[in-house]
């Protein structure tokens, strides 16, 4: 589903490239399709959980305490994310960095900090499924639900400058599954993590210092 979601962003966004006419946009029809796929994903996930059952013992709280901790965490995430993103964007704007670079780097990193914290804590507590599922599920949610709902409210113009970024996301998702399923223990090794960090840094350098144009992409 994660790989499908990113591929669909490329296919649905490049109307002019693929159809040879019109202009690139994520339309309301595309948004409805994303929402429909999100519902299918939720149904599929729910079906798997019912079929496999709960395999780990989980510490249980009362529903009031669970709700209270959940709301407290949501508020802390919202306030922290707002502070980080707003100040990071201000600093980047003062440095003369483009909005695209801000979105792909500072805003993306700032909004992903909660997921990073969740995955790190889950990994330290040996809840590997949560650590990986959090990252993968976040991508699925962002594409199917966030982009879907946003494009239904207002169609989103799709810039060809995003094409390389979408392709990088496709490659990263493919590598994630290739590493997990090729490992004897079905786990991500430390060298996998180091490789992902290196590739991310290389990608950051690429989008910052590569002024060239292709038929479907332009950095300038």
Image (spheres, rainbow, N blue to C red):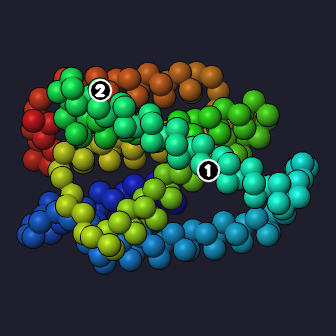
Q: CA distance from mark 1 to mark 2?
A: 26 Å
**Which image quadrant for residue 154?**
bottom left
Q: Nearer the viewer, residue 45 or 35?
A: 35
Q: Nearer the viewer, residue 132 or 147?
A: 147
| Labels 1 and 2: the sequence-earlier one | 1
Residue, x 19% and y 45% (percent of image)?
Answer: 161
The answer to whether residue 30 is above or below residue 206 is below
**Which image quadrant for residue 40?**
bottom right
Question: What residue is disc 2 on?
Answer: 91
Residue, x 17% and y 27% (percent of image)?
Answer: 96
Task: Give me the disc on residue 127.
Answer: none
Image coordinates of residue 59 in percent, x first then y, are: 90, 48
Q: Secondary structure at mark 2?
A: helix
Q: Secondary structure at mark 1?
A: helix
Image coordinates of residue 172 in percent, x first then y, are: 44, 40
Image coordinates of residue 113 in percent, x first then y, are: 53, 36
Q: Is residue 14 among what the camera can see?
A: no
Question: What residue is disc 1 on?
Answer: 74
């Amino acid at each position: 589903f994660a790989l499908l979601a990113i591929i669909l962003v490329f296919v649905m966004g490049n109307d002019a490239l693929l159809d040879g006419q019109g202009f690139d946009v994520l339309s309301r029809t595309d948004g409805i399709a994303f929402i429909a796929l999100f519902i299918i994903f939720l149904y599929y996930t729910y079906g798997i959980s019912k079929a496999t059952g709960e395999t780990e013992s989980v510490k249980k709280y009362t529903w009031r305490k669970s709700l209270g901790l959940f709301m407290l965490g949501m508020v802390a995430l919202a306030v922290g994310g707002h502070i980080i993103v707003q100040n990071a964007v201000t600093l980047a704007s003062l440095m003369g960095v483009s909005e695209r670079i801000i979105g792909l780097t500072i805003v993306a990193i700032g909004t992903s900090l909660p997921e990073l914290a969740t995955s790190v804590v889950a990994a330290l507590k040996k809840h590997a499924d949560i650590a990986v599922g959090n990252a993968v599920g976040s991508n699925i949610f962002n594409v199917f639900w966030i982009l879907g709902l946003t494009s239904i409210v207002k169609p989103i113009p799709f810039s060809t400058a995003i094409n390389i970024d979408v392709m990088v996301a496709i490659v990263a998702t493919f590598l994630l599954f290739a590493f997990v399923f090729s490992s004897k223990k079905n786990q991500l090794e430390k060298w996998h993590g180091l490789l992902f960090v290196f590739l991310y840094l290389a990608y950051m350098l690429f989008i910052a210092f590569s002024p060239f144009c292709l038929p479907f992409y332009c950095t300038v």
